[in-house]
Image: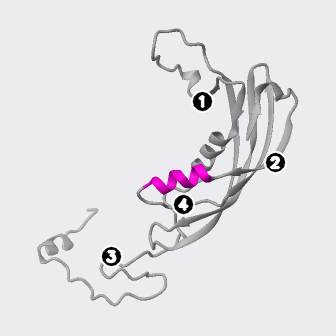
């Protein structure tokens, strides 16, 4: 969704819309491990207003996300619900000196330089920040057997117990914490 900067009022205005996710699906399809897949649309509830040239956005993005467990490799779904607050300020004028170092007060800022705010990349960013770094179907997931590959959540492994390395026997006799 795009909002013209001139149409952003000084008093908060609320809208709700469905944001398309083909960009997110394309991004995660390119990754070597396609851990996430998104529904065609995510629900967005957004409130926005301006104060001078600063633009304020706060809202929530929600939907059901598909994922592949990082331990057992089974597909599962989870509910994503992320609240966010964004402030956009006009981009500083180019001074012709090239690349400059950011000052401390500029680190948390996002800029806009056009007459229209495209919300899609901002919402995509919030979705990506809300995703788990390692998707797990459940915290207690036992994963796969590292020898035979059986899913330990559903059945017991029939692998024989690994005999310990006799060269490490001396270390098992050591007392720690004296």
Q: Of callouts 1 and 2, which one flags the residue occurring earlier in the amino acid sequence? A: 2
Compared with 20, 163 (above or below) is: below
In terms of sequence position, does the residue under pointer 2 or pointer 4 come before the other?
2
Which residues fall within the magenta stretch?
Answer: 22-31
Residue 12, percent from left and from top: 86, 34
Sequence order check: which comes first, mark 1 or mark 3? 1
- Taking the spot 66% from the left edge, 44% from the top edge, the residue there is 123
Look at mark 4 in the image and give the residue it sits on. 36
Which dot, 3 or 2, sits closer to the camera? 2
Question: Which residue is at the front of the view, 154 or 21?
Answer: 21
Q: Please name the residue that numbered disc 1 is placed on.
A: 108
- Distance CA(mark 4)–CA(mark 1): 28 Å
Q: Residues within 10 Å of mark 2 (few under 14, many from 20)?
A: few
SS for callout 4: strand
Label 3, secondary structure: give it: loop
> Left of 130 or right of it: where is 14?
right
Give residue 80's position: percent from left, percent from top: 66, 58
Q: Report how far apart the C-alphas of labels 3 and 2 lie in the structure.
A: 47 Å
52 left or right of 166? right
């Amino acid at each position: 969704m795009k909002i013209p900067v001139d149409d952003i009022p000084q008093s908060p205005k609320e809208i709700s819309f469905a944001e398309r996710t083909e960009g997110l699906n394309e991004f995660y399809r390119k990754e070597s491990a396609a851990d996430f897949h998104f529904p065609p649309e995510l629900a967005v509830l957004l409130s926005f207003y301006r104060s001078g040239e600063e633009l304020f956005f706060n809202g929530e993005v929600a939907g059901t996300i598909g994922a592949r467990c990082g331990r057992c490799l089974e597909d599962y779904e989870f509910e994503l619900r992320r609240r966010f607050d964004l402030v956009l300020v006009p981009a500083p004028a180019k001074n012709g000196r090239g690349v400059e170092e950011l000052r401390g007060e500029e680190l948390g800022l996002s800029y806009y330089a056009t007459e229209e705010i495209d919300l899609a990349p901002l919402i995509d960013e919030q979705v990506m920040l809300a995703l788990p770094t390692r998707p797990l179907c459940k915290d207690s997931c036992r994963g796969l057997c590292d020898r035979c590959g059986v899913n330990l959540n559903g059945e017991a492994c029939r692998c024989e117990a690994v005999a310990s390395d006799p060269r490490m026997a001396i270390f098992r006799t050591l007392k720690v914490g004296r």
